[in-house]
Amino acid sequence: MMATWRTAFGLQHDGVIVLADQVNALTNAYGGNVSSVSDMVTRIGPLGEVAGIAAPSLAAMAQLMNSVGVESEVGATGLKNMALALTKGEAATKAQKGAWKSLGLDAAKVAKGMQRDAEGTILSVMRALARIPAAARPAILSELFGTESLGAIATKLDIGRGPCTVCRTRPLPPRRGLEGHQ
């Protein structure tokens, strides 16, 4: 797992140790299974980086899903589909653009936001989803993220838990050649 994380996230040894410590801290503080959370982080790996999601935020989302019983395969699929949907931008279908509009958001702006502040953008999307009527939520979730991701994505609608704050307590060291970026 650690060698995979080193390659997937472009981390040096110390960065991998910090990420493993963060996964342990998250599961100790908020519940979940270290192996399952680590499996989700490993499965998503480089896609998270392409989508602008830093490894600690990815770990926090995986922990949140696992702590409410989402299996690692389902959680990884949900995270993958969420990352792809949030970064689709102008490539979003007409129906997806309509779903974004019903949330008061724009697909292209969401994609740009993911590159500037992925965590903030994801929280904004989850807040927008939480504000719409419960009866409309499944259709919008399905349109944006796919039906196989409904269970995984729905767990993140409870954004008040805030496990991402644990990730900020010990940031990852800078990536090789990209100081200041994780």
Image (spheres, rainbow, N blue to C red):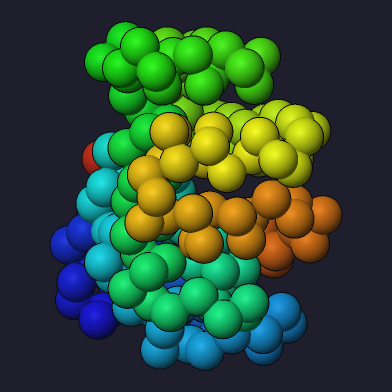
Residue appearing at x 75%, y 55% in the figure? 158
Place residue 82 in its image quadrant: top left
Residue 163 lies, in percent from the top left, at 70, 64
Q: Is residue 51 visible?
A: no
Q: Is residue 137 above or below residue 18?
A: above
Percent coordinates x, y for residue 46 in the rendering: 24, 51
Image x and y of residue 61, in percent:
55, 60
Q: State the count of labels.
A: 0
The image shows residue 145, relative to residue 104, as above or below, that is below
Is residue 144 placed above or below 176 in the rendered structure? above
**Left or right for 102, reference 47:** right
Asked if one can make out residue 90 in the rendered structure from this viewpoint, the answer is yes
On the picture, is 96 further left or further right than 66? left
Which residue is at 67% across, 85% downward? 31
Q: Quadrant of residue 73?
A: bottom left
Answer with left or right where residue 104 lies relative to residue 174. right
Pinpoint residue 87: horizontal percent, then vertical percent: 36, 28
Residue shown at the point (38%, 77%) measured from the top left: 72
In the displayed structure, 144 sits above or below 61; it is above
Front-most of residues 79 and 5? 79
